[in-house]
């Protein structure tokens, strides 16, 4: 971009988004991550068509190993669990549950957090203090402990686990939005725009937002992987999704009892979580490198 | 930067050496005289007089205490224990027992007895339960369940000491089962001197149960809540000191962890493996698996005080929806028997095998449900037992199977569970809609079995999980208990079971086998017909080096 | 300076009271509290150290907490030391070799480690090392047959100072038992520390004064390890603060997985037993500890480097 510092024009032109993408594409790992992610999302969406009923129990088909094992069958691609339910179908349904819930949770945290952050950045110091103190209190409580509190009050279940994780993610969205906005507000181009006569809302929504958007997108990505792991963790502890929901975390917990006879029942859901989180992190990493390497110039 | 590496790798090598290096000498002697049992749950209390849970009895009655008499569970013969001899008066109202001499109580960090066992200890043990004003009667919110359910609460007139070594029990009415009651866990003998010591020194009276003193083969050394119980052999035990010096109960509610601990050698014995582990255990040459047809019943109780379970048609509908064959296969690994009666099949001759089978018939179930006005189905809870018992090796799995069966007839079931003590507590209060539970028989006595579970008085003693009360049923059982005419007894019990079959306050699932697994070097460990586990007489074979 | 301490104190106090509001509410959920408690009574009792009595063990909550604390502290201290010991050098090495194969390997390995759900990672390691190879025990802190007096609560110290004849065997056994849990817990912090170290080191290296140092002709060693590291440490320790929450969550899951008698397992057991007294007591103390530690670190940092910039980027990449 060089040293062009035009006072009256927003230095971050729309072209920025194009070059972001180009940088991203050159990062092989990040692209791989993105592809895997898209694949997972597609599978999760197509799930009702490909897989059968994930809750169909079959006492004659207990604990069958995956199809590549000599005792496996092509009917059950990834084998069955102790109640004879098809693992492949369960993993796919679990995708919509685990990932779907996480996406909703992150969206909620975004929708609630960003406006709150904007509000906090632009309001009177008393109001700001109140909001930020509340957020700090929520942040001070370790994430799992906060989830335990919510579950203790509301009871176990996937929805309550979702509420818990939303509460965990919310404060950071608020804090980050607020601090990014405040940081940008001090920059010369904003002062220039203000001198130009731009209204406060125009400053925030048109002028600052592209700069704030980038790091927020990165944070959303990390939040998504955090949400997936946290929801699965709650499912694993028995505080989240309850039987017979094929949520990956609770599948892992159920599979522990048959771990010795059927290691695949334990490795598969875990692997699913791992691959999903890894792809998200690869994408987030790529985004971060792309954006940061530009700002370093 | 290469400066770091040599330093770090030396440290790592040192670590490996420390941890995996040799010198197992000291440890092996500890292993030879020590035994670790992976138990399923924490005991509710160390007081054997309260509660009904087998896991508690394993940890208190069978380890720390003795009773006046004991019973051969196979033959039903009464054997001497703390009492040498006994006689019954002609009218059956007075039982006189001669006590054994030179029996010593435990000496521990918190108490040293100054005398041996005598009649005052027997008096104390029973008066504490009978007398509501007794200083030690209140036990932290628990009740003397068996003292009540056996009828002794009403029937025991008096316990008196004829002399130092002789006691007499006076009953209001004759009860042919009285001697059997004296063999049961709640009749364990506590130390009167210890009670006096606590009272005199103003010690918190709960200590009598937190830091128990008995005459049993082992004494308590230390209990870490929910983690482990440490016992040491009682050197002056009346039948001779045990070969096992240190007995540890490693409390492991997670069945996979129990299995893992057994095969890795961290535990020497474990009980109630999951059905999926059974084959693995059997095929393992280092382990020995014992199993025994159990005198137990697992059931699905309907809380008949709550709608819609107060309606027999609804109960019948739900019962016909469940596929018990699948449960037998999946949960019990086919090691068990389905029963249509509340009595286990093994309880002969009283088990009524002429009862109509409760067939698996989802169509019939839907029809009955519609008849009762619930054609659109409804939502309900299944409370699943959280620990593994012979009558239910995997409550969660059983509940999941049933959940699916119920879904087929349009009923949505949620699975509810808590940790064992909380679970029992809540179910006793009647907080459940339906519950998966069971009962292990204490004796071959059908009357005792049925009255503990389904009689009106059992509601008060909190063991009737269906809260079902049918006076005709009660009457038949009482008559059967009081007659000595075997044919009449059998017919009376048969009729009682017919009534049950009509009303179905529960769906009986079946009885499972008691299964325990141990390392081959553990010797003389028996498997009890009436469930539970006892380590008296057990020893470890020292490998010849 | 005084202003700084006061400011931190204000934060700590308001956060603490905020948390007590939550724990107070939790406590009212307990089924039979008898007398209706007032918030003011609750606070008064808390300041006297009375957190109520556990409904399952009938012992005071504060006693239970102190009994379970050492196991957690031991685990966390060992794991974070290991993470620092391995992660920091790895991150720096990675930054120095930026864009070379070493950097790529370290960077993506740590990304992978960072993406592992800790509970699954623990299960995999148990399956492999304990069950398959049989070299580590499955769970717990010590083999059950060793009867060690719980003097400090730290198993490594207690076995070491124990008077039992087998105490050295017990000590080795304790290390044996702690190996897998510490490894499992240390994985994510190691990855995070490596990445944070790499990022801050990269940014420091790109700074002008590094070019100056190079121009001055200082040796490579001096540039990287003396100037670079020293300046990288400041924003680095700032990021460290945020990891306490992650460590705590990880510790709870590790304790659950390996049946270690620490605070995490205690809180989870309390939840399962509906023991609201223990639950609220445990949550209150744990959170208070975290707040204190954060506050102290914040104060230390600002004191050490009064001119530190507020870092707004939290992502470690």
Image (cartoon, coloured by chain):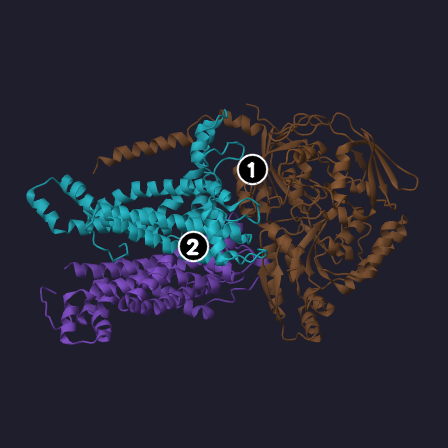
Chain colours: A purple, B brown, C cyan
Q: Nearer the viewer, residue B413 or B94?
A: B94
Q: CB of mark 1 within 8 Å of CB of mark 2?
A: no
User: Residue C195: which disc?
Assistant: none
User: Residue A144: which disc?
Assistant: 2
Q: Position of residue A263 (x, y in %)?
A: 48, 50
Q: Are marks 1 and 2 on the same chain?
A: no
In front of the other: label 1 or label 2? 2
Q: Chain of mark 2?
A: A
Position above or below: A219 against C257: below
In the displayed orientation, state which residue is furthest to the right. B90
Q: Is residue A172 visible?
A: yes
In the displayed orientation, state which residue is furthest to the left. C216
Q: Residue at x 44, y 64 (%)?
A: A163
Answer few, some or many: residues within 10 Å of disc 2's Cα (few below 14, many 20 plus, some between 14 and 19). Answer: many
Quadrant location of the N terminus of chain B? top left
Q: Please state the total of marks drawn on the protein image.
A: 2
User: Residue B267: which disc?
Assistant: 1
Q: Residue at x 46, y 59 (%)?
A: A248
Q: Position of residue A209 (x, y in %)?
A: 24, 70
Answer few, some or many: residues within 10 Å of disc 1's Cα (few below 14, many 20 plus, some between 14 and 19). Answer: many
Q: Chain of mark 1?
A: B
Q: In the picture, residue A26 is in which quadrant?
A: bottom left
Quadrant location of the C terminus of chain B? top right
Determine the CA span between mark 1 and mark 2: 32 Å
């Amino acid at each position: 971009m060089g040293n062009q510092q035009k006072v009256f024009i927003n230095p971050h032109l729309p072209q920025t988004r194009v070059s972001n993408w180009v940088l991203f594409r050159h990062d092989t790992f990040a692209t791989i991550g993105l592809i895997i992610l898209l694949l997972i999302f597609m599978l999760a969406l197509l799930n009702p068509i490909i897989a059968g009923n994930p809750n169909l129990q079959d006492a004659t088909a207990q604990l069958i190993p995956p199809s590549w094992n000599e005792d496996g069958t092509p009917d059950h691609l990834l084998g069955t669990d102790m109640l004879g339910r098809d693992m492949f179908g369960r993993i796919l349904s679990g995708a919509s549950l685990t990932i779907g819930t996480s996406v909703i949770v992150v969206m909620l945290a975004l929708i609630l957090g960003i406006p709150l952050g904007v509000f906090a950045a632009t309001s009177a110091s008393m109001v700001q203090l109140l909001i930020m103190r509340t957020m700090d209190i929520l942040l001070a409580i370790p994430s799992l402990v906060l989830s335990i509190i919510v579950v203790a009050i509301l009871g176990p279940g996937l929805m309550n686990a979702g509420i818990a994780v939303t509460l965990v993610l919310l404060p950071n969205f608020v804090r980050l939005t607020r601090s990014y906005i405040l940081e940008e507000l001090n920059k010369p181009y904003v002062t220039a725009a203000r001198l130009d006569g731009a209204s406060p809302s125009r400053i925030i929504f048109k002028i600052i937002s592209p700069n704030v958007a980038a790091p927020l997108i990165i944070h959303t990505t990390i939040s998504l992987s955090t949400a997936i792991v946290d929801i699965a963790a709650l499912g694993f502890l028995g505080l989240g999704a309850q039987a017979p929901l094929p949520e990956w975390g609770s599948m892992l917990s159920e599979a522990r009892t048959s771990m010795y006879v059927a290691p695949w029942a334990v490795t598969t859901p875990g692997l699913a979580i791992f691959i999903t989180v890894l792809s998200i992190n690869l994408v987030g990493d790529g985004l971060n490198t792309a954006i940061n390497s530009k700002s370093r110039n | 930067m290469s400066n770091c590496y040599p330093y770090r790798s030396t440290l790592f090598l040192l670590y490996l050496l420390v941890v995996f290096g040799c010198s197992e000498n000291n440890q092996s002697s500890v292993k030879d005289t020590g035994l670790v049992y992976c138990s399923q749950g924490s005991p509710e209390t160390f007081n054997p007089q309260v509660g009904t849970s087998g896991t508690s009895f394993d940890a208190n009655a069978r380890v720390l205490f003795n009773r006046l008499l004991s019973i051969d569970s196979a033959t039903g013969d009464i054997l001497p224990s703390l009492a040498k001899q006994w006689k019954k008066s002609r009218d059956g109202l007075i039982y006189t027992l001669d006590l054994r001499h030179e029996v010593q109580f435990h000496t521990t960090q918190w108490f040293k007895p100054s005398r041996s066992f005598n009649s005052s200890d027997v008096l104390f043990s029973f008066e504490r339960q009978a007398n509501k004003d007794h200083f030690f009667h209140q036990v932290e919110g628990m009740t003397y369940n068996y003292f009540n359910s056996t009828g002794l609460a009403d029937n025991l007139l008096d316990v008196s000491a004829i002399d130092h070594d002789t006691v007499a029990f006076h009953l209001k009415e004759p009860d042919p089962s009285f001697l059997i009651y004296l063999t049961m866990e709640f009749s364990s003998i506590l130390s009167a001197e210890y009670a006096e010591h606590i009272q005199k020194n103003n010690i918190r009276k709960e200590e009598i149960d937190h830091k128990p003193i008995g005459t049993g083969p082992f004494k308590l050394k230390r209990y870490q809540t929910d983690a482990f119980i440490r016992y040491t052999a009682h050197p002056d035990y009346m039948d001779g000191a045990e070969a096992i010096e240190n007995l540890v109960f490693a409390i492991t509610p997670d069945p996979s962890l129990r299995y893992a601990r057994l095969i890795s050698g961290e535990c020497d014995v474990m009980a109630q493996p999951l059905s999926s582990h059974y084959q693995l255990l059997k095929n393992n040459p280092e382990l020995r698996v014992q199993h025994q047809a159990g005198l137990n019943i697992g059931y699905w109780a309907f809380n008949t005080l709550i709608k819609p379970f107060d309606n027999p048609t609804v109960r019948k509908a739900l019962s016909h929806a469940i596929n018990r064959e699948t449960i037998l296969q999946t949960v019990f690994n086919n090691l068990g028997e389905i029963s249509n009666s509340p009595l286990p099949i093994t309880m002969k001759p009283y088990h009524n095998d002429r009862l109509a089978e409760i067939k698996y018939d989802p169509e019939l179930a839907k029809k009955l449900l519609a008849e009762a006005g619930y054609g659109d189905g409804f939502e309900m809870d299944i409370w699943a037992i959280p620990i593994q018992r012979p009558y239910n090796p995997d409550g969660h799995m059983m509940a999941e199977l049933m959940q699916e069966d119920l879904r087929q007839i349009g009923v949505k079931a949620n699975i509810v569970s808590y940790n064992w003590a909380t679970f029992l507590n809540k179910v006793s209060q009647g907080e459940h809609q339906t519950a998966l539970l069971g009962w292990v028989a204490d004796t071959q006595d059908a009357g005792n079995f049925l009255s503990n579970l389904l009689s009106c008085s059992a509601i008060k003693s909190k063991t009737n999980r269906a809260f079902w009360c049918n006076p005709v049923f009660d009457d038949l059982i009482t008559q059967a208990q009081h007659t000595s005419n075997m044919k009449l007894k059998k017919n009376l019990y048969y009729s009682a079971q017919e009534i049950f079959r009509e009303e179905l306050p529960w769906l009986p699932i079946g009885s499972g086998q008691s299964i325990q697994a141990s390392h081959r070097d553990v010797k003389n460990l028996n498997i009890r017909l009436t469930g539970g586990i006892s380590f008296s007489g057990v020893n470890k074979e020292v490998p010849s080096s | 300076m005084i202003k700084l301490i006061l400011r931190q104190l204000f934060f700590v106090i308001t956060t603490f009271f905020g948390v007590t509001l939550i724990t107070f509410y939790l406590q009212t959920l307990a089924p039979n509290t008898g007398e209706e408690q007032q918030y003011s009574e609750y606070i008064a009792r808390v300041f006297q150290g009375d957190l109520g009595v556990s409904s399952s063990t009938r012992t005071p909550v504060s006693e239970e907490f102190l009994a379970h604390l050492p196991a957690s502290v031991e685990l966390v201290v060992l794991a974070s030391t290991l993470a620092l010991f391995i992660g920091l050098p790895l991150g720096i090495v990675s930054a120095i070799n930026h864009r070379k194969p070493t950097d790529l390997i370290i960077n993506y390995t740590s990304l992978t480690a960072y993406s592992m759900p800790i509970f699954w990672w623990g299960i995999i390691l148990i399956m492999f090392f304990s069950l398959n190879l049989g070299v580590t025990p499955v769970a717990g802190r010590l083999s059950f047959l060793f009867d060690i007096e719980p003097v400090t609560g730290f198993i490594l110290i207690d076995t070491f100072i124990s008077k039992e004849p087998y105490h050295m065997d017990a000590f080795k056994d304790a290390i044996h038992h702690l190996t897998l849990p510490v490894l499992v817990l240390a994985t994510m912090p190691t990855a995070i520390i490596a990445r944070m170290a790499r990022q801050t080191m990269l940014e420091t290296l790109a700074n002008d004064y590094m070019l100056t140092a190079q121009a001055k002709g200082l040796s490579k060693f001096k540039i990287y390890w003396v100037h670079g590291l020293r300046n990288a440490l400041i924003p680095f320790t700032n990021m460290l603060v945020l990891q306490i929450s992650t460590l705590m969550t990880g510790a709870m899951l590790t304790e659950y997985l390996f049946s270690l008698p620490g605070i995490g397992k205690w809180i989870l057991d309390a939840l399962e037993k509906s023991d609201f007294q223990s639950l609220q007591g445990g949550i209150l103390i744990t959170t208070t500890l975290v707040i204190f530690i954060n506050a102290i670190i914040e104060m230390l940092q600002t004191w050490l480097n009064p001119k530190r910039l507020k870092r707004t980027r939290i992502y470690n990449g």
